[in-house]
Image (cartoon, rainbow, N blue to C red):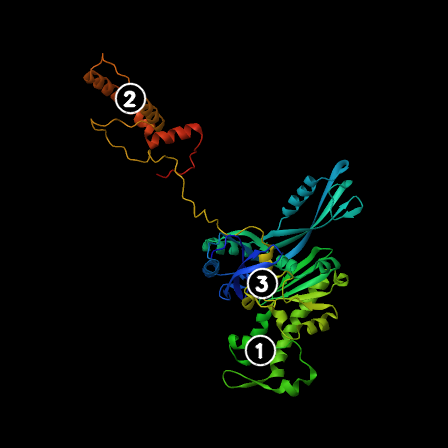
Amino acid sequence: MSTTDFIAAIELSSSRIAGIAGKRQNDGSTEVLAYACEDSSAFVRKGQVYNIDKAAHAIQNIVTELEKQLGTTVAKVYAGIAGQSLRTVENRVNHTLEEEDIISAGLVDRLCDENRDLPLADMCVLDVAPQEYKIDNALHTDPVGVAGRNITARFLNIIARHQLRKNLEQAFEKAGVKVADMLVAPLAMAHAVLTESEMRAGCALVDLGAGTTTVQVYKNNILRYLCVLPLGGNNITHDLTSLKIEEGEAENLKLHYGNAICTDDDDDDEASVPCRLNDGRDVKLHELNDIVGARAEEIMSNAWNQIQLSGYENELFAGVVLTGGGSCLPGTETLFRNVSRTDKVRTARFVRESLHGHEEELGQDARLNTLLGLLLAGRDNCARPSSASRPAQASIFTQEEMKPDTPPTPAQTVETPHTETTHKTEENEKPVQDTSKTPEKEQEKEDKGKNKNHGKDKKKSSPFGKIIDLFRDGMLDESDSIKN
């Protein structure tokens, strides 16, 4: 049974490309109708698409699988954008009125537009988070309706390299998949996993991904800081290859035996139990976790340093929230507490909203929180209307006009335009008898009239004559293409 109302989203991360489709229910929950994923390491690095052809092929595969599960066509999808170059920069815009007046919404919009014109070399503004407005000497978060003469707007621009967005757009374009909207993936995920009280009281969200680690800071329900570190779980996997094993085996060891904490008694009990490698060698557990813990501590230290650089270190009353696939590593919460000396640390295993369907694929291990955030952020129906398959190109000619011209035979009458034909048909329904005219003379007169007006009628009924009329009436211009 096909579905005609759903939202679809696709995320391209450093470890996988995943697509999802879901439908909101009347009770506020979301039903997951379809899910598909495949490996993305061959075309995504540090969150950025670097092989457009392979990415386009993977996008096609994901959409095809979603359509197979849905039983209908996916018209468009929401796409998430993230990557190493993603970060925030602050900008201020000033405006002074001729005299004190009430600040209007139009003035605020002009300030926002002026902010977006911020000159950035090789960077583009993906989104804007207004921080505050200073009107004369008072600060406001909503300036509309406030009286004043001088207004200073402070904005936080979320920027990224042009190439990051360009490559993503080209991949979807080459795949033939329409993008409903390109959402900043970290923002969508933050609104899906953080509570309103956490965002209001102040908290930091650390997304521990495979290729990158994203740090966000929120205070008073406003984004205050965002940056992406080029460190992630893949670095831990790569470090484990120093044991002279391949990355696939190293990843498997990390997932099954890895721990971010190495205690002093690792040489005893379980820590001394050897891990058997594929080549028959044994590696003690504490030796394995010495490697895992060292890199994990480096990632946590860099994330905490970014939180300090945000300037909100002492205003995070709701603490720190960890998420992403890296947060599933045992001992991660404890390690972050040790590094930051912060007691309030929790792990967001799943989004806050109620979801049902495909529980086995989705799980609750925080790996798909970004994808689920994109799904929940979508608003438009992504299904193609059942009555609207791909529209055919409209023709400017009627069916009658598209017929080729054939010379009339003596027994045939010359075709006239559609309107004239209708008129003559009505007249011929009630013929008038005229005894003063013989059939031979009537036929001779009719033949003369045909020969006289044949050129005019042909010009009117031909496609080229119609084109000339359309140009004269202004319905076409020289740039329009004409298809027979």
Q: Earlier in the sequence, mark 1 or mark 3?
A: 1
Report x, y in % for residue 273: 60, 86
Distance between the Cα atoms at labels 2 and 3?
74 Å
Q: Is residue 85 visible?
A: no
What amino acid is at disc 1?
His
Mark 1 vs mark 3: in front: 3
- Badge 3 element: strand
Quadrant into which the C terminus falls: top left
Q: Nearer the viewer, residue 166 or 425?
A: 425
Q: Amino acid at mark 2?
A: Asn
The crowding category of the residue bearing disc 1, from other C-alpha atoms within 10 Å (few below 14, some 14 to 19, many at least 20), is: few
Is 158 placed above or below 258 here?
above
Badge 2 or badge 3: first in the primary sequence? 3
Identify the residue at the far right of this view. 137
Residue topped by disc 2: 453
Residue 252 image position (x, y, % from top left): 54, 76
Looking at the image, which residue is at 30% across and 35% down?
Answer: 403
Q: CA distance from mark 1 to mark 2?
A: 91 Å
Q: Which residue is mark 1?
A: 256
- Tags 1 and 2 touching, CB below 8 Å: no
Q: Tag 1, which secondary structure?
A: helix
> Looking at the image, which residue sits at the far left?
440
**Looking at the picture, which amino acid does disc 3 mark?**
His
Query: Which quadrant of the structure image shows residue 81?
Result: bottom right
- Residue shown at the point (20%, 27%) measured from the top left: 411
Residue at 69%, 58% (x, y): give it: 225
Frontmost of labels 2 and 3 is 3
Q: Position of residue 133 (x, y in %)?
A: 74, 47
Q: Position of residue 102 (x, y in %)?
A: 75, 38
Q: Which mark is residue 356?
A: 3
Could you tell me which residue is drawn at 68 percent across and 39 percent down?
A: 106
Q: Closer to the camera, 96 or 425?
A: 425
